[in-house]
Image (cartoon, rainbow, N blue to C red):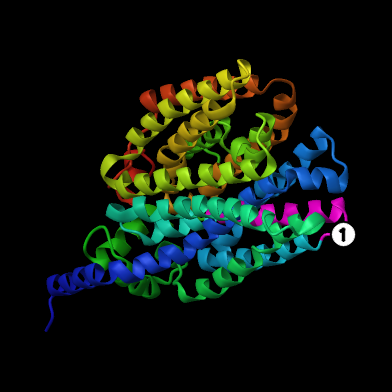
Amino acid sequence: MQTHQDSNAVNLTATKTHFNLYLLGCTVVAALGGLLFGFDTAVISGTTEMLRARFALSDSLLGFTVASALIGTIIGSIGAGKPADLIGRKGTLAMLGMIYFITSLGCALSWDWYSFIIFRFLGGMAVGGASVVSPLYIAEISPARYRGRMVAITQFNVVFGILLAYLSNYLIGRLGLGENEWRWMFGIMALPSVIFFMLIFLTPQSPRWLVARGRSDEARIVLRRCGTDTGSVDDEIHEIQQSMDLVHHSLREPFYTRRYIKPIMLAVTLAAFNQLSGINAVLYYTPYIFKMAGAGVESALLQSVIIGFTMMIFTTLAMVIIDHFGRRKLMIIGSIGYIIGLLGAAYAFYAKVEGSLLLVSLLVFIAAHGFGQGAVIWVFISEIFPNRVRARGQALGSFTHWAMNAAISWTFPIIAASAGWMAFSFYAICMVGQLLWVLLVMPETKGVSLEKIQEKFGIE
């Protein structure tokens, strides 16, 4: 007869055996939502001048056209928590894949400015939802010792999606497709959307979502294949049940209470600083920024590819070391790099010596983002909330991120048109604030199980 101790040993062996292929495979598939997220947000950077000409847009209307998707992300992010809790993380990701497909074709076939805005808005809702559910799902299937790297694959795919968008725009731009060039730039995303939708059905439901729904036997199967923090599937199930404490708490209990104030403030602050760096203003308007500095159209698109490639390299480096180096150290190094890069860009515009100085400054800035905030934000926010409110917490962090994103992206072309140095100087000052926040407030979460982080924050 097999003892409980022997059973635990079998569970632990199964956990280690299946990690390399099964956990990584599920993570990569879920992270494809991040790839579509990155592609969708960056693809418009190569189309801004064509959209301006096609729809006769002023600086203000161009800003709104870019921000229209971001308004969708705000709604999509704050609304993603409910379906993620009701139909599960997996079902929500499948739904988002279908929305990506429909909206990419919709933008490509739009017949006027209003229809384009509607499809960009709906696509933005999918982006907002993916920014919540992809890291949430990956965090919940990953053991603590791998969680940073696994969730960071989402950010890697976001960056890879951005690079693919820049590269796709550049290659399409060389085909000489004329006034319909921008339609191809948007429509190409339909292909990866279909692939994502089909692959997501090969992944399991989140074990923590299953436990919350009383489906512990199914959760055991997933934990045996994905891995545990305790080495025992039964102990892991028990720990998850204790953290939810559904006898005294409800999955529908109020979220904005004193009990959750610490993770709420951490998530909101980190997400706000992410956008106050100006990262998405740079990503959305990269060719526009270089053309302001005197570059030609093709040169500006090529420099965008260089920017995207640089961010991918440094995001990959951060992804490899985040579980050893820790979240706070990456944020400190990234904050310092932000400040240096932004001050360099501000000086380049102020002294009108843009050229190579602007490119080098933006490369430093992008490298700092990939190594710091870019790698940390979705990992950290997915870790700090208790199991019973994690979907809503992730939604709040994502909502803050996209609300700030919309504000920054809408105002950037207006400010930059009069004085580009002012925008970059403002972002640099904000990053000084981020550095102080990391040094004085931000806790370290590396190597700590999701349930133990809840205890660390004193949440019953």
Q: Residue at x 76, y 61 (%)?
A: 108
What is the x, y in percent for residue 46? 68, 47
* Identity of the residue furthest to the top in this view: 351
User: Residue 354 is drawn in which quadrant?
Assistant: top right
Name the one closer to the observer, 6 or 116: 116
Determine crowd level at label 1: few under 14, some 14-19, many 20+ residues with C-alpha closer than 10 A.
Answer: few
Q: Is residue 253 magenta?
A: no
Q: Is residue 249 visible?
A: no
Of the 4 image quadrants, the one containing the N terminus is: bottom left
**Relative horizontal placement of residue 42, taking residue 389 as reference (left or right):** right
Q: Is residue 341 above or below residue 30?
A: above
**One can see residue 146 in this view:** yes
Q: Residue at x 49, y 27 (%)?
A: 341
Decide: is 348 above or below 70: above
Which residue is tagged 1?
111
The location of residue 420, given as percent across then percent down, is 66, 23
Q: Magenta part mainly helix, strand or loop?
A: helix
The image shows residue 194, relative to residue 438, as above or below, that is: below
Q: Quadrant of the C terminus?
A: top left
Residue 66 drawn above or below residue 178: above
Residue 121 lies in the magenta stretch: yes
The boundaries of the magenta stretch are 110-132
* Residue ID at (47%, 50%): 155
Q: Position of residue 195 (x, y in %)?
A: 56, 72
Q: Disc 1 on helix, strand or loop?
A: loop
- Tell which of 9 and 22 is nearer to you: 22
Query: Percent position (x, y) of residue 326?
Result: 30, 40
